[in-house]
Amino acid sequence: MKIDALRLAKSAHDPIEAGNLLREYVQARILGSLHESRAFESLSFVGGTALRFLYALPRFSEDLDFSLETPAGYDAARWLKKLKRDLEFQGFDATVTFSDKNVVQVAWVRIADLLSPAGLTPRKERKLAIKLEIDTAPPAGARLETKMVTRHLLFGVRHHDLPSLMAGKIRAMLTRPYTKGRDWFDLLWYSSQIPAVEPNMTLLSNALAQGSPCREPPIQASEWREALASKLGTFDFEALRADVSPFLERREDSAALNEVALRAAISKD
């Protein structure tokens, strides 16, 4: 409910945390609505927000990413109409837009009259915006699991397992034309698990072939460590830390983004 979202924002230590808490609450409501629509019979939950909701990654995330696994029954337009009704029932002034023109279909959920009542802006017209992306032609090879979401609500979602989520992250890091501190923080998180997570190599190989078909020479999945290591010497680490810091539960954790730690994270030992 909107009143619960505002209560969360008021409990925050500062405006940055308040914005993160508001966004995450609405994300949970979106996921809950999709669950009720049985969307996860067709989709799997992927990306950094999946790590946050399912594995307690200690950083907040902006977007909701999904992979189409079972085309039968896929009806994003219907699910999103229900989502709008659900959000309005919960007291939110919501607009939902959807484009299915590309392979990666995109929806935007925008919530009016939330940031201003939460004390985050004097401009009443500003809206909280959350992007949903659905890859309707994902690379093959992901392994799927079902896990309970327990953040704000309680429901089950189908998702990529950790090695497959890691493969998706590495694919993004190797094919993006820009660098995100959030990507590298997530890589540190994967390497810090006991035992350390290793990527799903079948999925990574297929994803790289799909994501960089014209690259010469093509990126080989078996060389992902070397490919990432080659990027480290070009980094502005202050910019890397500045990118991730606003999203961290403990902003001081951004100090972990240094060359020594990152080289250790991608080493084989």
Image: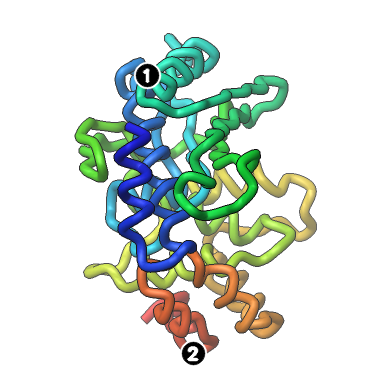
- Front residue of 174/204: it is 174
202 is higher (above) or lower (below) than 188: above
Residue 132, visible in the rendered structure: no
In the picture, measured across the screen, residue 79 lies left or right of residue 207, that is left
Task: Give, as a three-letter code, the residue at label 1.
Answer: Phe
User: In which image quadrant can residue 152 be found?
Assistant: top left
In the picture, measured across the screen, residue 23 lies left or right of residue 171, that is left
Q: Which of the two marks, 2 or 1, is nearer to us in this view?
A: 1
Q: Quadrant of the C terminus?
A: bottom left
- Front residue of 250/217: it is 250
User: In which image quadrant can residue 38 be found?
Assistant: top left
Q: Position of residue 260 (x, y in %)?
A: 49, 90
Residue at the disc numbered 1: 89
Circle 2 Cα neighbour tier, 10 Å, few/some/many (<14 / 14–19 / ≥20): few
Residue at the disc numbered 2: 260
Q: Position of residue 14 (x, y in %)?
A: 43, 67
* Colouring: rainbow
Q: Which numbered tag is attached to residue 152?
A: none
Q: Residue at x 73, y 45 (%)?
A: 213
